[in-house]
Image: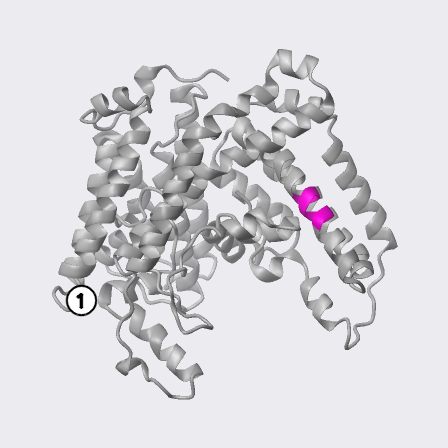
Amino acid sequence: ARMAEPAFKTTGSKWLLPVSELLGFPLDQVNFLACQLFALCAAFWFRLYLSPRHANPLVRHAVATLLGIAFLIFCFGWYKILVRPACHVSITRTSLKCVTFVHSSTCRYSMLTAMGYLTVCQVSRVFIFNYGILSTDFSGPLMIVTQKITTLAFQLHDGKNVRPSLIEYLSYNLNFLSILVGPCSNYKDYTDFIEGRHISRRLRLHSGTCNGQNGYDKTPEPSPTDSVCRKLLVCSGCMLFFLTVTRSLPIKYNVNADFVSRASFLTRLTYAFFSIQAARPKFYFAWTLADAVNNAAGYGFLGMDENGKPSWDLISNLNIIGIESATSFKTFIDNWNIRTGIWLKTVCYDRAPKHRLALTFILSALWHGVYPGYYFTFLTAIPITVAARAVRKSVRHLFLGSRVLKSGYDILTWAATQFAICYTVMPFLLLAVDDTLVYYRSMYFHVHIISILAAVALHRRHKPREPSASSAPCSAQCQPVHSNNNDKVD
């Protein structure tokens, strides 16, 4: 796949082109970072000077929407914003109006409309850029908007929300806090935030769990400053890692002809592992910064933790420690792109009558775009997930009787999980068919083969055991992947 020429890098603002040339970063990345840093400052202003005490919800909705649209225009230009996201929102709102008045299948029509429009735009993106890879482009906001409008449509169908007004609908979809990189959040949580009920409602829940002591009305409203500073520190570490390590381990080198032909299998496997590890911090950076922006505005309060300290992780999109220490495929995808995983579970997995796992992974691939690498990744994830479930059900209980055995099992499963993830997501980063096939041939398709054989062999051998008092915790942990929002993959 050919990279796009520099002229096609962005159709957004050229104001920061001198900065782009000075730093050696693509202009689309510089524009994105500038908008997110401006959003961080605007978020503090929004919380302090445009709080519900000082402004009514209509003003807060309007300001959040206008700032979001301004960011879109700055990053991607007038044409792409007016033609694509604006059409996307208006078309799906037309379908959404019918959700509460027509047959229950109308919400599915909203889903088909939103995904269909997104797919058309993704196809045009590939055609226009000829498989050129942009780090940021108009498809990102479209993907977030698609999640939001379909989430809202199904929540309306389920009776969990009231139908929003036009300004509420626009604000939810286009607000500056999440328009560029997300995350997708529940509509009710967002309106509670705008109307000033977001924190008090969760403090009230915390007060109820404390037997009425220290009532929420007597508890000072927690400040997000510590959480924002901590998340910005993580962002700084990720940026430093990207500048010093990630650039020295390019993903494309995995399919370099000389490297593939001359390096041994173990060398290729080792490089693949470390190059994938090095690729993660850019995702950590983008999602953590987005989380910090929402927190700075006063959004994202989850409640008080077990130590009585405020937690601001309601809409966090990842758990870095959980990702890096994952000892199962399930645990990894539980902690990666969390909000997208919840969306997939809500709109697909929990509603599909059969073949739920396959349909969920296919929807995830379609939502990401039309690059072939996405489909290689998510289709490969299906047998790996099935095999991981079978291994956990059939083997894990044999290692729980001894701390030493359990520690050895955890180390082994950590290594297996990390290498399986590396193998699975490589096409996601390579994108093209030729590069993907070169990589999988160099790996001898070993994960595909092992996963399919393990799934077939253990499926036939495994027989459900009668639960006992001593095995009850294990049984709870060994539930199918969907029981904890974990059919989420990115």
Note whether residue 145 is visible: no
Name above or below for residue 216 compared with residue 399: below
* Residue 485 is at least partly visible in this image: yes
Q: Residue at x 33, y 16 (%)?
A: 6
Q: Is residue 62 above or below residue 438?
A: below
Q: Main secondary structure of the magenta part?
A: helix
Secondary structure state at the residue bearing disc 1: loop
Residue 476 image offset from top left, x and y in percent = 68, 67
Q: Nearer the viewer, residue 351 or 389?
A: 389
- Identify which residue is drawn at 66% across, 44% down: 417
- Residue 416 on the magenta span: yes
Q: Is residue 183 magenta?
A: no
Q: Residues within 10 Å of mark 1 (few under 14, many from 20)?
A: some
* Residue 485 or residue 169, whichever sits in front: 485
Residue position for label 1: 52
Residue 30 falls left or right of residue 132: left
Three-letter amino acid code of the residue under disc 1: Pro
Viewer-proximal residue, 248 or 369? Answer: 248
Range of residues picked out in magenta:
411-417
| Residue at image point 41% right, 52% down | 150
Q: How many marks?
A: 1
Vertical order, 475 against 364 (above or below): below
